[in-house]
Amino acid sequence: MASASIRRVGVLTGGGDCPGLNAVIRAVVKTGIYQYGLEMVGIEDGYLGLIQNRMHLMTPEEVSNILTVGGTVLGACNKANPASFATWEDGKWVKRDVTDEVIDHCRQWQLDALVIIGGDGTMAGAAGLIERGMKIVGVPKTIDNDLPETDMTFGHDTAVATATDALDKIHTTASSHHRVMAMEIMGRYAGWLALRAGVASGADVILIPEIPFDMDVVAGKCLQRSKRGKRFTIIAVGEGAHPAGGEMIVDRVDESSPDPIRLGGVARYVADEVEKRTRLESRYIVLGHVQRGGTPTAFDRVLATMLAYNAVELLMAGRFGELSVLKDGKVDSVPIEAIAGKIKTVPLDPPLVRAAKAVGTCFGDGDDGT
Ligand code: F6P
């Protein structure tokens, strides 16, 4: 049964952008307007738009022809969280709770509910607003696929395809030059992206945060391949991968962000160490934000559309505080608190790691099945 109390709905895309966000915006806005006669309000630049009172009424025309376009027409921001919003004051970042202002802006715009599209940090922000009585449903997104309670997040499949394509491409240059090539792949503290892209492209070594590596094992694998007459070694490195007993390598600390750590540098470390230990010429590549862009795959467009439709249905059924998810292959929902601020890492000894080890892939743990 449709909820009579919902007439005007705000939509926001929080956190880092990812392919498929526009597919969600399109489906949420069109379903809201066509199926329920709702007024849809686009909130600009994630929580920043709520904090700074920047929003606009949306029309079906605004979301026409965006299904296949990467990024988000609403804009995104991975620094703003109403409970801890940073402003630059007297030469330093000062964090304040601006939830009252946000609630006031929602009142001014007569928003009865919000559809919040985002990852763990964005959902933690949503949980704070729900506690203050706001009616919210969520749609999980991230290229990292690191959210619990959902089989897969949209954006991940596209990012895997992008990283796979890049790994495929470096095979030829690595082979031409007899080089070891280490490619750094995003994913923060979870190795899903590096693992899947590495397996898809047949990387010889895959390093992920969940399996700490031994540099001697990695170097040994490169040397062994070279001695066998292999002209190259491809290493897929998740940005959170780290040596056993060592720390993840931090590229920068962004004090203005609620989640200030930005990882980076491990591919360079791995390539340098391999060259030092083996004298095999080595190079590193940091794939970076290219993984967040581009046209979403058909899988991501379908997933995004299904989850978005389900989110509007949840809203109109009065099931506030729920997150629209894919569970055991079916569209479902879980409480937003179930994922707020939590992450899903690659489990120890998953079938995909076992399968990769069986074909000789090295994970740097000395157990590569060959
Ligand atoms: O969470 C998505 C992600 O792309 C991570 O894989 C990466 O570590 C991080 O965001 C990069 O953040 P930023 O866009 O702030 O550099």
Image (cartoon, rainbow, N blue to C red):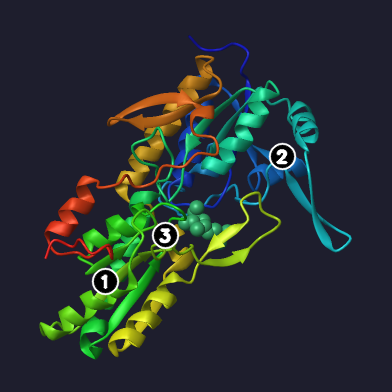
Disc nearest the viewer among 2 and 3: 2
Q: Quadrant of residue 231?
A: bottom left
Q: Is residue 302 left or right of residue 7?
A: left
Q: Earlier in the sequence, mark 2 or mark 3?
A: 2
Amino acid type, callout 2: Pro
Viewer can see residue 10: no
Identify the residue under disc 1.
217
Give the structural element (helix, strand or loop) at label 3: loop
Closer to the eye: label 1 or 3: 1
Residue at 25% x, 90% y: name it. 177
Q: Residues within 10 Å of mark 1 (few under 14, many from 20)?
A: some
Q: Farthest right residue? A: 90
* Residue at which label 2 appears: 82
Q: Residue at x 35, y 45 (%)?
A: 300
Residue, disc 3: 294
Q: CB under 8 Å between callouts 1 and 3?
A: no
* Quadrant the C terminus occupies: bottom left
Name the residue type under label 3: Gly
Question: Looking at the image, is 298 positioned above or below residue 29?
Answer: below
